[in-house]
Amino acid sequence: MSASGLSAARLGRLRGVLSRHVESGDMPGLVALLARRGEVHVEAIGTTEAGGSEPMRRDTIFRIASVTKQIAAATAMTLVEECRLRLDDPVDDLLPELADRQVLTRIGAPLDDTAPAHRQITVRDLLTFVWGLGAIMAPPGQYPIQRALEEAGLEPAPGNPLIEPDEWMKRMGKLPLAYQPGDKWLYHTGSDVLGVLMARATGQPLAEVLADRMLRPLGMADTGFHVPQVSHYRLAAAYCPDPETGALVLSDDPRSSRWGTPPAFPAAGGGLVSTADDLLAFCTMMLNKGRYGTDRILSRPSVELMTTDLITEQQKAENTIFFGGNSGWGLGFQVFTRRTSLASTPGRFGWTGGTGTSVYTDPAEELIGILLTQREMTSPGPPNVFRDFWTCAYQAIDD
């Protein structure tokens, strides 16, 4: 047994299991990384494009979608530590578009059937996704608020919106909240609003805020909202399955000019690209309670707060598709609360991305796992490649 406490023989299963997902055509390729007690195991399998010849490499760049939320939340906490933001202060001063909110009287109400908000929206509400708007888990267009969000270009989605942040906030401010602040957990949109808040709090574009406070201190040179031309050849293609046939359809060509320049709206909810090793640096900092090497990025109490389940039992019960009855939500992270599978260790934290990425840190097992694929998720539930990766990770523990 190695110093990592991971069995070499059992790690050998990982490549075989993941290779089956590539060989079956589920995805052209993937990169998987496991780290424990200073030892790192990486598998790069398949190719960067369907039918292509360029092999996946350890430094291949992926669209990480909602894994962005972890990095954005940690960056926001650096501002909280400096008292430039306060968790329980209203956001009205920096986000006047969200002041004096009206709230729908019921989820299916017309947009003008509203009542005043019971209280103001806070920074904590944005981080815990209870501020009143977000992904409404119903068939598309079922409710007027869903249709209004889509028509305004505000519908929750991975990637970066096409409109400028100020215009995005202006449109957001014209719509009522779906629920009273603090009442319901609604996925995604709180992170994008948080990104605008951080930019206004610092007077810097969000890309610079993340770079100054998180990416450069951690040496995350390949993480950002666009891909420099010199690195374009390392950006993998992205695919989504055809809903009728299951065949892979190219959804984002790596040669697209969209990745060559910074986006109009750098989205804290899902706009970053990154690599396995860059994400390892971030997870290592979180595993080490905010310290990276000799540098302290966050305080230990901040990391502990971020990775504490902070939502109510009712909010979790209303979102079992996200939480599965064994986890909750902290400040930007899913947090496991009870063990119902090999991987659901209490205290394990992280999140997944709709473009096919899964990144979690487990303090109890001292384990970091990172899976980067090219196949978009088709539901909030984990696809089989995620399940198999995490099963292989935990069955390899040999102490």
Image (cartoon, rainbow, N blue to C red):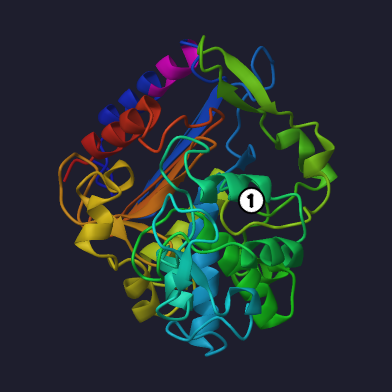
As drawn, 300 above or below 249: below
Q: Would you say 77 lies left or right of 315 here?
A: right
Q: Nearer the viewer, residue 349 or 249?
A: 249
Q: As displayed, is residue 4 above or below residue 18?
A: below
**Residue at numbered disc 1:** 271
Q: Look at the image and say whether residue 363 sits in the magenta stretch.
A: no
In the rendered structure, which segment of residues is drawn in magenta? 18-23
Q: Classify residue 80 as left or right of residue 38.
A: right
Question: What residue lies at 55% left-to-right and 36% top-to-bottom?
Answer: 355
**Residue drawn where x is 27% and y is 41% of the image:** 6
Q: How many marks?
A: 1
> Residue 109 at what x, y percent from top left?
45, 53
Q: Nearer the viewer, residue 42 or 342?
A: 342
Q: Position of residue 221 (x, y in %)?
A: 68, 56
Q: Position of residue 119 (x, y in %)?
A: 42, 81
Q: Residues within 10 Å of mark 1 (few under 14, many from 20)?
A: many
Q: Is residue 358 left or right of residue 36?
A: right
Q: Is residue 62 visible?
A: yes
Residue at 50%, 13% (x, y): give it: 246
Q: Does residue 262 sit above or below 48 in this rendering? A: below
> Residue at image x 48%, y 11%?
23
Residue 20 part of the magenta segment: yes
Place residue 54 in its image quadrant. Answer: top right
Give the residue type that dot 1 points to. Gly
- x, y (%) of residue 205? 74, 69
The outermost residue toward the bottom is 83
Q: Could you say whether the residue bearing mark 1 is in a helix, strand or loop?
A: loop
**Is the magenta region chiefly helix, strand or loop?**
helix
